[in-house]
Amino acid sequence: MNNPLRDARDRRLNRIAGPGALVFFGITGDLARKKLMPAVYDLANRGLLPPNFAIVGFGRRDWSAEEFTAQAREWILASSRTPFNETVFAQLASGMRFISGAFDDDDAYQKLAATLDELAETRSTGRNHAFYLSIPPSWFEIVCQKLSEHHLANDSNPGWERVVIEKPFGHNLQSARELNEIVESVFPADQVFRIDHYLGKETVQNLLALRFGNQMFEPLWNNKYVDHVQITMAEDIGIGGRASYYDGVGAARDVIQNHLLQLLALTAMEEPISFNADHLRSEKEKVLTAVELPEDLGAASARGQYTSGWQGAEEVVGFLDEEGFNPKSKTETYAAVRLNIKTRRWDGVPFYLRAGKRLGRRVTEIAVVFKKAPNLLFGDHDTDEFGQNAFVIRVQPDEGATIRLASKVPGTQMEIRDVTMDFGYGNAFTESSPEAYERLILDVLLGEPPLFPRHEEVEQSWRILDPFEEYWASQPTQPDPYAPGSWGPASSDELMAKDGRTWRRP
Amino acid sequence: MAPPMMIDLPDTTTSKVAKKLISSRRTHGVVALSRVLTLVVITREGFAENAIEAANLASREHPCRIIVVVRGNTSAKNRLDVQIRVGGDAGASEVIVMRTFGPDVVADEALISALLLPDAPIVAWWPHGVPKDPYATALG
C-alpha cells in the first residue's frame, strides 16, 4: 500500500516500517542482547518503527513480560547507539511480550499463537509476523516445523510472515541444500532473509555506488590494468567463548564462504541493469559461477592456528590451549585461498582471500592492486619507494576508500614515493553508516530482500569452498602456527611469494 | 605553540587505543591516513621526552605519525599505559606514547601492529642504545 502523501521520487524522507510483530527465538543469546535489541531500540528512537510495533521474546528462561522488559532495558542501555529516551522505550516496552519454553515445546507455541492473536487485537499488528531465528542451525528444522504445525506460518494468515536466518547456512553444499529445503518448505523463497551481518546493506550499496556511480574506475576494472585483488577480513579477537561453536567450523566456513565470497562477487560482477533484487542477484550469481578452482589446492591455499603469546599488551591464550578445547583440533583460525575468475574481464587476475582471528588489527577491506606502470622515465629509480597503484575499499572500521599513487617528493631531485589519497564516510558526511543490524531489521520489516544472498549464491559459495575443505581435511598435518598480533602463518606469505606478490599490510 | 590535546589511556590494550584513535581523528580532524610514514621510536624511561621533542620537529619536515615505545620497569606487573597527543605542538599528525611495564609487554610486532597505517612504510629509531644487530630485534 502506498502512502498517497509520499512521492516515490522524494529521497529525503526515511522509509518507515509498517505495523507488525517481531518474534525473536533465542532472545537470551549474546547476539540478541548485544545487537538485536539495541538495534530495534535505535530504529524506534530514530522514528523508523510504528508506535504500535510489538516484540515477542522466545527463550528458555522463566521470565515474565516485566522481567523481559527490565532485561531489555539493560541491554539497550549498554549497547544502543542512540541516546536513551524514556518515552521511546516506554512505548516500545508496552509492546513487549515473553514466551518461556523450549524450542520443541508445543505449549510454548500455543502461547505464542495466543500472544500474537492478542497483539493483533490490542496493537493492530495486522498479523504481520517476522520470525528471527537467532539459534543454532540444528534447531531450524524443529522451529520451522512447529511454526507450521501451529499455523503460525504457511497458512492463510492475511498478514505477511517472514523468517530471518543467520549464517552459517550449512557447513557444506549438501547440508546447505537440506537446510534450505526445510526453511523453504515452510516459508516462500522471497520471504526468507539470510542475514550476513558483516555485510550490511549500507556496505553493499556504498560499494556499488563507488564502482558504478563513477566513471573513472570502470575502464580500469579488468585484467588489462588490474594485477590482482586482495580481500581481507582480519579480527584482533580470538574465539573466546565460542570454542564449542568454532571447533570443526574454522575461518573458511565462518567467514570466507559467506562474507568474503560475497565481497568478491560484488567486486568482480558486471554492472546490473538495475538495483532490482533479481538483476543484482543474477549478476552476483554469474560471477560466482565463473569462479574457477586452482588445480593444486594445496599450493593455492594456506591455513593457520594462533598460538599463545602477548598481543598489544594483552595475554592471549592460544587456540589449542583454550579451556575445554580439543588440543588436537585441526580447525583453522586463519585461512587464505587463491581463486581465478574465468570471464573475459578477469581471466588471469587472481583473487586472494584471507580471513583470520588474532591478527594485527581489526579490518575488512578490498584492495584492487593495479599493474606496475612501464616506468620508462623512472627506470633507474630502483631504490625509490613506489610501486603499484592500489584502490582500497575499507569496509570496516572507519569505512571509506583509499587510492595509492606515486608522487614526486618536493625538491630539486626527481625522487618518487608512494602517497595515499583518502576518503572516509565519517569525515565526508559527519555521519557514519548506520549499524548493519538496523538496516537489516528494517529491510526485513519493509520486505525488501534485494541484497540478501539468494540460495543459489549460497550453493555456489559452497561449491567453491568445499574442495578446499575436503583437501584440508585429507591432510594429516596441523594448520601452521602463527603468533597473535601477526599477519598469519609463514605459509600464507609463501602463497603470495610463489606468484611474485606480497600481502598488503592492511 | 599551543599544548597538544592529550588523551590518557592507563592500563589499556592496543585494540582499545586503535578505537580511540579513530574517534579522536574524527573529533579533532587529524588526518593520519595521508601521512607517508610511521616513525617508531624505541626508547626507555628518562630519555622519552627528548626523543619525542626531536621526533616532533622532524615530523614538520617529513610528515609522519610517531609511535614512541617507552620501556619502563621490566620487573613490574605487565601493563601498558598509552597517551595519545594530537594538535598543538604534537607535530604534523598524532603522537602515541606507549609506556610498557613488566617482562612480557615488549616492543615487538604484536604490540604495535594494531596502530600502524596500511601500507605506509615504517622507520624505526633507537635514540639511545641502538641494538648491535637491529635486524635481529623484534621490530627490526
Image (tube, rainbow, N blue to C red):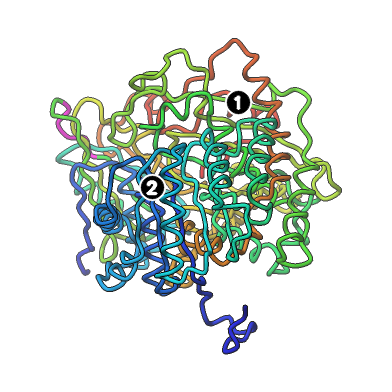
Residue A121 vertical position relative to residue B37 in the rendered view, above or below: below
**Chain of the residue where label 2 is placed in the rendered structure:** A
Quadrant assignment, res A469: top right
Q: Estimate how packed mark 1 is, as few (under 14), some (14 to 19) or many (20 or more) residues with alpha carbons within 10 Å.
A: many
Q: Earlier in the sequence, mark 1 or mark 2?
A: 2
**Which residue bears the numbered disc 1?**
A302
Dot 1 amino acid type: Ala
Q: In the drawing, what numbered circle is on residue A27?
A: 2
Where are the magenta residues, as a range?
B70-74
Task: Examine the rendering and report whether any part of residue B105 can be seen.
Answer: yes
Which dot, 1 or 2, sits closer to the camera? 2
Tags 1 and 2 touching, CB below 8 Å: no
The amino acid type of the residue labelled 2 equals Ile
Tell which of A215 and A241 is nearer to you.
A241
Badge 1 marks a residue whose secondary structure is strand
Task: Say which residue appears at 64% left-offset and 84% top-offset.
Answer: A9
* Residue B85 appears in the rendering: no
Residue A241 shown left or right of residue A262 in the figure? left
As drawn, the residue found furthest toward the top would be A476
